[in-house]
Every structure is written in C-alpha cells, then in structure tokens.
Image (spheres, rainbow, N blue to C red):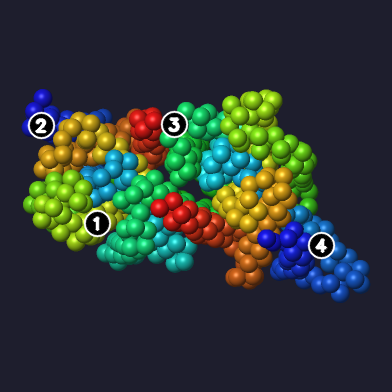
Amino acid sequence: MPHKTKLIVLALLMLLSIALYLGWNLGVAWQYALGLRLKTVAAIIVAGVAVGVSTLVFHTIVNNRVVTPQALGLDKLYELSKTAIIYFFGASTLLSLNFVTDYLISLLLMVTFALLLYRFIFQKVAQQNIYFLLLVGLICSTLFDNMTTFFQVLLDPDEFQIAAYAGFASFNVVKMETVGLSLLTIVPILFYSLKHYHKLDVMALGRDHALNLGLDYDKTSRVLLILVVLALASATALAGPMMFLGLLVLNITLELFKTHQHHILLIGIILVSILCLMIGQFIVLHLLNFKTTLSVIINFVGGIYFFWILLKENKKWQ
Amino acid sequence: MIKRRYLILLLLPLAMISLFVGVGEMSLAGLWAGNPQDWQLFWTSRLPRLMAIVVAGAGLSVCGLIMQSLSRNRFVSPTTAGLYDCARLGVLVSIILLPSASIFVKTGFAIAVTLMGAMAFMSILATLKHRDTVFVPLVGMIFGSIISAFTTFIALQMDLLQNLAGWLQGDFSTILNGQYELIYLSVPVLILIYIFANRFVLAGLGQDFATNLGLNYKQTLFLGLLLVSVITGVVIVTVGAIPFLGLIVPNLVSLYLGDNIRRTLSHTALLGALLVLLCDVFGRVVIYPYEVSVSLIMGVVGSVIFLWLLLRRYRYAS
C-alpha cells in the first residue's frame, strides 16, 4: 500500500473514532454532553499533535526507537510541580491559580530541567550508550515520583484527590484556555518541523553523514531539542504524564510506514497519536465509566510493549 | 579500608543521638533519675524506632548484596528489580481479599508476591543474551513500573490509592511499641544469609560453574530469593519502602573491600544501618518539630549516589 493511501486510511479511522466518541450514547441532554465531548476532542487533537511531533523529532535526534522524551522523566516533573503547588499553597490555589501562570510555571520547570539534563549527561553519553541515558531518565523519574509521594502523604484526603487528578492524564475536565495556550506553542513548532522536514531527513542519517552533507548538526539538534521539550511540556500540561505514550505511537508509526521520510512520518505519527488517545479516552469514558484514568491504561499497555521491545531487541544482538 | 570498628564507633553515638531527638521531653538525667514518663517514652517510641532503623537498614542492604551476587550484576537491588512494587501489590491483594486481615496475613501476601516477582525477574534475566550492566536494572525498573501501573489501576477502581501510598513511603515516625515487632523476623533471616553466604558466592559464578562445584544451583537461587523476599516484605509492611538503599550500600562497600560476600556482609549491614540512621536523624532535625520521611531523603541521596556510581562506571568503560 503506498504511503498516501495509508495516511488517508489513518485519517478516516481518526475521524471515525472522533465521530464514535461524540455520538456514543448521547442521551437526553445531548447538547450539554456534546459540548463537553467536543472540548475533550479538541484537547486530544492538540495533545496528539504535541506528543507526535515531540516524539518523532526526538527519535530523529537520538536515533533510537526505545528512547522517548517521556522516558527522561519530564512528565513526572509536572506531577511533582503540581503536587508541590498544592502542598505549599493549598488546593484552592491550584484551582484558582491563573491558568496562564500555571502553564508558564510548568513550562519553565520542564525546559530548565531538560536543558540541564542535556547539558550535563545527555551530550556526553547519548551517542555511545542509549541504555545509560534511559536509566538516568528512569532514576530521575523515580526521584520525582518519590518527592510527589512524599507531598501526597502529607496532604489531607480532599487535597490529595485534587493532586492525584491533577497528576493523572485527564481529558475529562478540559480547560479551553490551556488548549489555546498549547495551540499557541504547538502550531509554530509543527510549522517549523514540516517546513524543515528535509533537515530532519538528513539528521536521521547520523552526525557524521549530516555534517558531510553540510548540515550544522550540533546547532540544529539543540534547536530541535528545545522544540521537543516545549511541545512535550504543553502536551503534559494538557494531558498529564504518560510515560509510555511516545514509545507506543512512535513504534506503531515506524512499523506502519517503514520509511525515513519525515514529511510522511510526521503526519503519520500525529494521526496515530490522536487515534491512540481517542481510543483510550473512549475506553475510559464509555466502557469503564471513568473508573480509571487514561494514563493508567497507557502505562500498562505501553509498559508491556516496551518490555517486549527491550527483550526482542536484546535477542537480536547475540 | 574502613575497619569495622570505626563503623561501630560511628554507629553508637548516632544511635544515642537518635534516641534523644524528638518532640517529647526526654533526657538522660530524667532516665537516670528513673522518671517514669521518660522511661515510658523510651520504651514505647524511641527504642523501637532505633531498632527498626537498624534492622531495616541492615536487612535491605544485605538484600541488595545477595541479589547482586545472584544476578551477577552490580546494579540490581530491590528498587531496581521492582520488588517494592511487587510487595505493594501483595499488600493491595490482601486488603482487597481480606479487608480485616491482621498484619501477619498482609506480610504473608507481600512476601509471596515479592517472591513471585523476584523469580519472574530472574527468569527474564536468564533469557537475556546481551547482559549489558546498565540494561539489567533498566529491565527491572520497567518491570516494576508495569506492576505499579497494574496496582494503581486496581487501587483506583477500589478507592484505595491513598491507603496504598502510605505503604510505599518509608517512614519510621509511626513505629511504636507493639506495632513493629514483626521486623525482628528479619534478624534470623539475616543470620541464615550469613550462614549460606558462601553458597551465594558460588551461585554468583553462574549455573554451569556452580553445578560443577557441587552446588544445587536452582535450590540455592530459590533460597536466596526467598530470604530476600522475606526481608523486603517485612520491611515494606512495618516501615515502608526505602529506595536505593540495597543498591548503593553494597556498591560503596565493594569499592573498598572487593566482592567476597563473607567479608563484606557485616560491613554492608553496618553501613546500611548507619546510612538509614543518618538519614532519619537528619529528617527529624531539618524541619523540627515536623519530620521529613526517611524514604524521601534516601530517594534524593540514593539517586544522586546511584548517578555518581553510574557515571563513574561509564567513565571507566570508555
């Protein structure tokens, strides 16, 4: 099947999933329900674009299918910052906190941390040993997790509920303002990466080849990394932490398209991300009746998939 | 080389400090004068706490040492093999199946699930062809995160999430006379480990070699994992998880003393107790009269030391 047909099929599937989500069991107060669901769909589309772009561009920089930006612990940092805000200022602050400030705080924290990590560890190690980088990311995740748990235990149960739900990915309660802000971050990034897709194609060849072909590899990768972090930060601010989402969509896309041309991969991964999120949200809302959160499902499925990939890749090297 | 007696010399004054740090009034003079209130505080809170710290610190460190020997990997420990997550799942299962179960039943469940997890982890390791030092803890931590996602999923369904968060958090402030004695179960287990230490060294040479030397490899492996699971389960139920302890202490000791378990075992136990004691006293002093839980401090200290160990190893490798 040519790539174009695949893209069209994916787009149709995505539209179908959106229609299903919107139309399923609407009930009497359908205007109200439809309004809420439309907001969720808008948030999912923006988050899907953000996750897709950041994961694919990151994949191009590090040239590895297993290392995703989520694995570096950035989304856990979001959970921690949310819980810390609740702990230090009380839950009412988080609810009433100006969403612009809230968004900017999360964005700033994540970008700072990512750049620090990149500067001190990533740059030296990433090319040689990818497992090392993954492990460092995991330790950082554990560290953030630990601190989050610590704050959570100190909270009283009401505030804890708010903190838990601020942390988990949730498209159930969507603030349109956050969607708008994320959109403002995402659109320039999407535009930039689509416009410079040929640069990405060259980057994917590796540092030596890219330099040979006249691309300033180090500078480009630095710019791209900042874009990745910004995109991921807005995705997390919108949806909460989802450790294995990037891995899931990246590998599905690569398996599906088996190409290195970024103008196809970019659109493909965005469609796949939105489709995955829509299916997950459909399960949470319609099949499980809000009894669980999207991040738990994604982490469970993605975690098992990750495990499987690790073991499979490992067998290949003997 | 650090002599054992120096460790003991350090441990004793710290233990004295630990006994006398706290909100309640208690002084040496009061104890000397036979003041009943002072003695009551001493028996119900301070002494149990000190004993729990020493036993848990020594136990978890030795667990890490045994696991590192059995798996032939420096970076394996209860934290990096997902054992805490397994123990937590065990506690959750017991809360669901037998809500009014005694602490012994809960511990039994925790130990059983931990043992199953440890055996699963070891059999996954056995299938790995490419045993990169960094790869193994990575697999273990992903294994733990899958278990943890599963636990969270069930806990969310049953509204037990906050109840469970407490089990994950290592905290000595709730240790009181009459509620912690279970932890002494670790002491005979530690003695057993010391007796069988030589067998674990042999098992660490690999299945073929160990069998050649006349060792029942499977049996020894099972025994080692069983002893580790008992200590982990008991500590999780009485104290909570203390992250990274089993990872960093054996590594620090082996930097100076090498890999002969029989020789390093007592040092590991002493240093583990010392480190936990230090963290606990620090946690009690830093925001006096409140407390910072020991697992948070260990999480921060431990992850930093782990990163240092990793970077150090990486520098040697390249």
Do marks 1 and 2 share a subunit? yes
Q: Amino acid at mark 4?
A: Phe
How many other residues sit within 10 Å of disc 4, few (<14), some (14-19) or many (≥20)?
Answer: some
The kind of secondary structure element at disc 2 is helix
Q: Amino acid at mark 2?
A: His
Tell whether B219 sits left or right of A79. right
Which numbered marker is on residue B281? Answer: none
How many other residues sit within 10 Å of disc 2, few (<14), some (14-19) or many (≥20)?
Answer: some
Which numbered marker is on residue A3? Answer: 2
- From where the camera sits, is residue A152 visible? no
Task: Give percent across and percent down for residue A208.
Answer: 19, 51
Separation of disc 3 and disc 2 at Cα?
36 Å
Ranked by sequence position, the earlier of labels 1 and 2 is 2
Task: Give percent across and percent down for residue B231.
Answer: 68, 41
Residue annotated with mark 4: B42
Quarter of the figure with residue A65:
top left
Separation of disc 1 and disc 3 at Cα?
33 Å
